[in-house]
Amino acid sequence: MIDIAADGKVTEDEISDFLRIKDYLDNMSLTIDSLKLWVENTIASGEIAKYLLGKM
């Protein structure tokens, strides 16, 4: 990705790597959003005492 971003352009020979990296980042983002939702729901349901979480 650094090589692709270095010149600020995605060339034809870089497009397959670019798309693969984009898919990976999209999947990572979805996973992170899902985990954040789980954490928020776990806290909201009272399964974890808020005082144990410190400053949230």
Image (cartoon, helix red, strand yellow):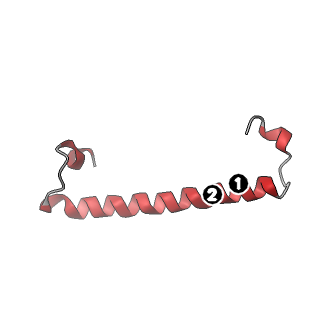
Disc 2: which residue: 35
Q: Secondary structure at mark 2?
A: helix
Q: What residue did someone put label 1 on?
A: 39
Q: Residue at x 85, y 39 (%)?
A: 51
Q: Could you say where residue 5 lies in the image, as x and y percent from the top left? A: 23, 46
Position of residue 15 measured from the top left corner of the image (x, y, whole percent): 20, 62
- Disc 1 residue crowd, few under 14, some 14–19, many 20+, Cα 10 Å: few
Is mark 1 in CB contact (under 8 Å) with mark 2?
yes
Calculate the distance from the C-alpha at mark 1 to the C-alpha at mark 2.
6 Å
- At 83% from the left and 44% from the top, the residue drawn is 50
Q: Is residue 38 left or right of residue 27?
A: right
Q: Amino acid at mark 1?
A: Val
From the viewer's perspective, tell me whether residue 38 is left or right of residue 51.
left
Q: Nearer the viewer, residue 16 or 55?
A: 55
Q: Is residue 34 left or right of residue 6?
A: right
Amino acid of disc 2: Leu
